[in-house]
């Protein structure tokens, strides 16, 4: 056996030979949990389609009533943190590694490798934007349909000549795209590694699911804007 | 119909003091059925005898002529020039030690792999030359045959980002090799022994799943299937094994 070539490696192996297995499993398991969370989250948001947000509000109340929010949110944050450390160790971090990875990716013109570059980039985007999203939601708790609607419809500061952007809307568009990209292809990567399904067919299925979720998400943003026009902030839903 | 093609080839001989890496153009008239192997030989014969590249069998058996063809790994002998644009690049495979120009030393790397993965049948049975060969089911024989088709060209290693940035990673070819012994009933190694060999980041758990190996393998070895098989087997073994006091030497 040449695996333990030097002292450091020998000590690492001796500490617990199964660590590499646990770390690899943790990456896949946290990934699957987070994809499940995200898709569930989007389905919950999608309830805004039904009866002008009454169901949306009762689901939100349910989160508080059954302690799903109180336990669920810290638990999700913990899972995200574990996932960042477990999956992050795969990404090239040193300048030397980054250069090698970038040069090779450009040279190969290989779809799956490019998709992985996208996974790394969306991971960074999600890391920042999901934190902002969480902060926003937590500081305006509880979640209410009209509150969300007016947030999405909120106009930004008018620039020169009265030009303004709905920055919350664009924030959600960006976070939705990054999140669904990362979740869809991340799950694909997990299935590829463990080989439970034929990978090309699996790719089509996951792309299909991702498109459906994106459709729900964009549709929900549209519904929020419509709701904001119909009901004033704090107004009653019917 | 013939056309003129330009081969932009990486030139660098580390053995010549002061030599610098550069790309050099060679123009050639293409004819029907021309492989890259033929084109390179024509260049060496008629234009530049100093051009270094490897080949032995010219029939995709020996795995010597692997290189980056227009950025992607492939075998020169198995690549028809008509499938390439009129101007393309040739680079040596990364990861492996450069001998010069397009020639790399895959031998040392693969030799190290053989030793690390102990790529031989481990058995305590005494060989009896007079006895009949032990029977093997057709299914098992075919399952072993698939990973066994690997010709050790190194394309999967060169195309793998993990193998490029972590020199200890044994790559798809290494894990594929182990899978062959895992399936073989004649190999008497225990789960624990296999786990010692590939149950780590340098082996089965190091793969990120980019699948360039699977897509660009010139022999179309089902690498994804074999990598996943070893990962699942090692995970199952690791979860049920009691490795306390396990000696890793």
Image (tube, coloured by chain):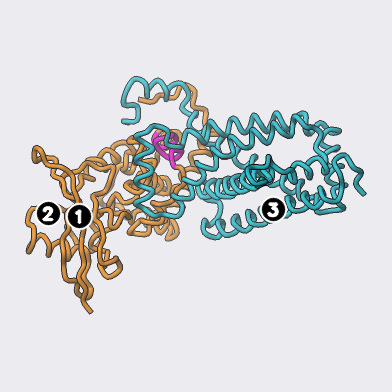
Would residue B14 be visible to someone looking at this image?
Answer: yes
Quarter of the image where one finds residue B79: bottom left
Q: Is residue B156 left or right of residue A112?
A: left
Q: Which residues are magenta?
A: B197-207
Q: Secondary structure at mark 1?
A: strand
- Please report contact status of discs 2 and 3: CB closer than 8 Å, yes or no: no
Q: Nearer the viewer, mark 3 or mark 1?
A: 3
Percent across and percent down for residue A142 are 81, 34
The cyan chain is: A
Residue with the mark numbered 1: B9
- Say yes or no: labels 1 and 2 on the same chain: yes
The answer for which chain carries disc 2 is B
Residue with the mark numbered 2: B51
Q: Nearer the viewer, residue A195 or B120?
A: A195
The answer for which chain carries disc 1 is B
Percent across and percent down for residue A38 are 67, 43
The orange chain is: B
Q: Quadrant of the N terminus of chain A?
A: top left
The label shown at residue B20 is none
Q: Is residue B78 left or right of residue A158?
A: left
Q: Nearer the viewer, residue B195 or A238?
A: A238
């Amino acid at each position: 056996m040449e695996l333990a070539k030097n002292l450091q490696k020998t000590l690492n192996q001796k500490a617990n030979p199964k660590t590499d297995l646990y770390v690899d499993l943790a990456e896949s398991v946290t990934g699957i949990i987070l994809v499940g969370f995200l898709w569930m989250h989007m389905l919950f948001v999608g309830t805004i389609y039904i009866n002008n947000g009454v169901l949306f509000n009762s689901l939100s109340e349910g989160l508080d009533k059954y302690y799903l929010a109180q336990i669920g949110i810290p638990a999700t944050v913990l899972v995200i943190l574990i996932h960042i450390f477990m999956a992050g160790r795969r990404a090239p971090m040193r300048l030397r590694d980054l250069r090698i990875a970038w040069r090779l990716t450009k040279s190969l013109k290989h779809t799956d490798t490019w998709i992985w570059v996208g996974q790394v980039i969306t991971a960074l985007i999600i890391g920042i934007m999901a934190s902002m999203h969480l902060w926003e939601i937590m500081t305006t708790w509880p979640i209410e349909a009209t509150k969300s609607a007016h947030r999405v419809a909120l106009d930004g500061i008018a620039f020169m000549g009265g030009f303004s952007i709905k920055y919350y809307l664009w924030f959600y568009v960006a976070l939705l795209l990054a999140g669904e990209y990362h979740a869809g292809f991340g799950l694909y990567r997990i299935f590829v590694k463990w080989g439970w399904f034929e990978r090309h067919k699996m790719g089509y299925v996951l792309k299909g699911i991702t498109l459906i979720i994106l459709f729900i998400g964009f549709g929900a943003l549209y519904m929020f804007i419509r709701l904001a026009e119909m009901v004033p902030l704090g107004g009653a839903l019917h | 119909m013939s056309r003129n093609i330009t081969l932009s080839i990486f030139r660098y001989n580390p053995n010549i003091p002061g030599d610098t890496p550069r790309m050099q153009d060679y123009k050639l008239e293409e004819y029907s059925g021309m492989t890259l192997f033929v084109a390179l030989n024509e260049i060496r014969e008629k234009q530049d005898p100093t051009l270094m590249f490897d080949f032995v069998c010219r029939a995709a058996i020996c795995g010597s002529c692997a290189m980056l063809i227009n950025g992607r790994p492939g075998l020169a002998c198995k690549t028809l020039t008509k499938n390439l644009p009129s101007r393309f690049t040739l680079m040596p495979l990364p990861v492996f030690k450069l001998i010069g120009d397009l020639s790399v030393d895959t031998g040392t790397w693969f030799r190290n792999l053989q030793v690390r993965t102990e790529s031989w049948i481990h058995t305590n049975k005494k060989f009896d030359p007079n006895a009949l060969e032990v029977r093997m089911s057709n299914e098992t024989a075919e399952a072993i045959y698939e990973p066994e088709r690997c010709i050790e060209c190194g394309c999967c290693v060169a195309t793998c980002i993990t193998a490029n940035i972590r020199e200890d990673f044994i790559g798809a070819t290494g894990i594929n090799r182990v899978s062959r012994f895992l399936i073989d009933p004649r190999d008497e190694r225990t789960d624990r022994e296999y786990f010692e060999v590939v149950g780590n980041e340098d082996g089965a758990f190091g793969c990120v799943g980019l699948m360039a190996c699977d897509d660009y393998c010139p022999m179309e070895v089902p690498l994804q299937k074999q990598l996943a098989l070893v990962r699942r087997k090692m995970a199952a073994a690791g979860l049920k094994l009691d490795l306390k006091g396990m000696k890793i030497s």
